[in-house]
Amino acid sequence: MKKNNGLGQSTIVFKNKPRIESYYSMVGKKEGQGTFKKYFDCILNDDLCGQKSFEVAEREILERTILGALDKNNVDLSDIDFMIGGDLLNQIISSSFSARHFETPFIGLYGACSTMCESIAIGAALVDGGYAKKTICATVSHFAAAERQYRTPLELGNQRPPVSQWTVTGSGCTILSNTNRGHYVSMATFGKVTDYGVTDANNMGAAMAPAASETLAEHFKDTGTCPDDYDLIVTGDLGKLGSEILRDLMEHRGYKLGTNYCDCGQMIFSRNQRTFQGGSGAGCSASVLNSYILKQMDAGVYKKVLFMATGALLSTVSTQQGETIPCIAHAIVIERGEENADDIS
Amino acid sequence: MNKEERNKRYLAYVSAKSPKTEVWPSLFFAFIIGGLICCFGQAVSDTLANWFPYMTETELGAWTLVVIIFITCILTGVGLFDDIARFAGAGTIVPITGFANSICSSAMEFRREGIIFGMCAKMFTVAGPVIVFGIISSIIIGVVYLFL
Amino acid sequence: MLMTYLKVFLTGGIICLIGQILIIKTKLTSARILVLFMCLGVFLEGIGVYQYVVDFGKAGATVPIIGFGRTLAKGVIKEVSTKGILGIFTGGLTATAAGIAASVIFSFFVALIFKPKTKHS
């Protein structure tokens, strides 16, 4: 079925160009020593953020990130129509608890590490459809809080397997609006839940890569584009292994990803930080998008970016019961607002 | 190609592609650190035997474990144990240090959820099976010996 | 003296080495490794073999969790011969009480004093 504003089965086109009015990123200390240290808006010294637990710290990081995004471009909180976001903790407590302070309609999402893409896609749809003037899209994750929920106690002396990834302590916030300045979200492709039978909860990259290839292929098919049409194709947190697998899977489908393809998880930590396959978590793609990628777009390095975040939809219970890991990937296309070019010059 | 066939091929591809643990360094560290911990235990035992010449072999063994467990808990508390264990692997898991660390780390982790339902209830999340299996297997041995 | 420590080192090292091989080959988690080795200790003591390893390796054989299993089995065997049926229930835990009680009490106080810290690598 062909939708009104749609292309193909999974892609929507935003005709009214929802703009990115403001963006902000905040990361923990370890991330702040990584590749993108120059680009993050705020780097925390203390992973506890002065709070009494890692869960409260995660909330605090999200709140500060949202306030940071509002302050950065003087957006008034009363103009915000919706707050959209999610995180990795059970019952997405970080997002919903933070939403208490903003007193704005809240749409809580769970797409694991794909949540940032999902929230921007939904926020863009609301703005594009005229249902909202401005929306906040924000996600957060915290290494220590995720570790204790999904894995083992922090001080337990075990060895992380070489396929594992490191949950990013970080948060990113994008404010979308119906103004006519700034970069805009031009398309969104929603992914299908894909499961290739991976059961190893440590090997997230391998579990998520098939979902990524599914969505990416669907996007190219729907829009009639090819990998070379984008200045940058960036995945959320497949990590080193996962992004290599994605290249193979895409080649198998007949699309060759060139040097314009990269992965936030693989890039966020530098090689000597011993994270094995790189970063993961809802805050990984969020913090990289809202720092490095959008700042590079501001500078004019990238004009058309395909941003795709992947998520593994597992829980500790499903893992213990030996279930396979279903995964999902959503993609959005961000294009550089030409009006911005005038501002810079 | 049906889904099962596809998944099987994908999993085979993934396991071939995934990087493996560097075997030799990890074996080396496990051997060295495991050996050193045992030597430390022997030193504790020998020292105690010097100080208290009338202690029996069993008592010496128990005291040695208590000392090692105490040191493990302190190292876990200050956050050094997991740094050592990262290199040692089984070298710190297999000695009694692994048992003590699993109890201590769980107790610390869940302290924030309260003393009763957090710390005390979840102290044995990792080490619980060891105690359960220990008791069951010792009872089996007891039953066998009873009828021998 | 030096010879004793060499034997201790070798015995303990080799037991840990076997554990590490298991971790690499089978992806067993640490809890499973602990359970496996402890049951192995109970079994080996049950069939009367482990005493030879202890005689050779001393602390190298008693400090690993396998030695904990051995103490359990030893306790049960001893109490069954002195107390009969009740010994089946009391023997194991009586013999290992020191280790378990020490782990619990030290962990309790350590957890009251220290807070878990984020890993850095």
Image (cartoon, rainbow, N blue to C red):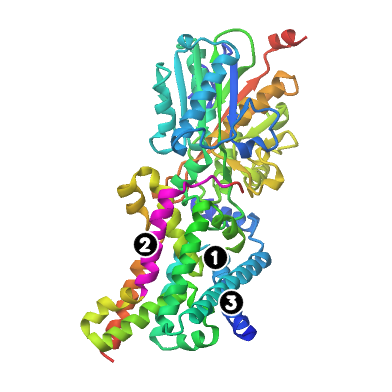
- Mark 1 Cα-neighbour bin, 10 Å: few <14, some 14–19, many ≥20: many
Report the magenta residues as a range.
Answer: C96-119
Looking at the picture, how far across and down is residue A303, in whole percent? 71, 21
User: In terms of secondary structure, where does tag 3 sit?
Assistant: helix
Q: Main secondary structure of the magenta part?
A: helix
Q: How many angstroms separate mark 2 from mark 3 (CA)?
A: 26 Å
* A276 relative to A229, above or below: below
Tag 1 and tag 2 share a subunit: yes
Which of C49 and A256 lies nearest the eye of the viewer? C49
Which residue is under mark 1?
B92
Question: Residue C14, which numbered label?
Answer: 3
Looking at the picture, how far across and down is residue A144, in whole percent? 50, 43
User: In terms of secondary structure, where does tag 2 sit?
Assistant: helix
* A199 relative to B58, above or below: above
Which of A168 and A6 lies nearest the eye of the viewer? A168
User: In terms of secondary structure, where does tag 1 sit?
Assistant: helix
Q: How many angstroms separate mark 1 from mark 2 (CA)?
A: 18 Å
As shown in the figure, which amino acid type bears the numbered disc 3? Ile
As shown in the figure, which amino acid type bears the numbered disc 2? Gly
Which residue does the image show at 40% across and 38% down from the upper left? A90
- Residue located farthest toward the bottom when viewing the structure as drawn: B148
Question: Residue B128, which numbered label?
Answer: 2
- Mark 3 Cα-neighbour bin, 10 Å: few <14, some 14–19, many ≥20: many
Q: Is the residue under label 2 in contact with that under label 1 (CB below 8 Å)?
A: no
Q: Chain of mark 1?
A: B
* B94 relative to A227, above or below: below
Which of B108 and A97 lies nearest the eye of the viewer? B108
Looking at the rendered image, the disc whose residue lies closer to the viewer, 3 or 1, is 1
Residue C102 is inside the magenta segment: yes
Answer with left or right where residue A221 lies relative to residue A129. right
Q: How many angstroms separate mark 3 from mark 1 (CA)?
A: 13 Å
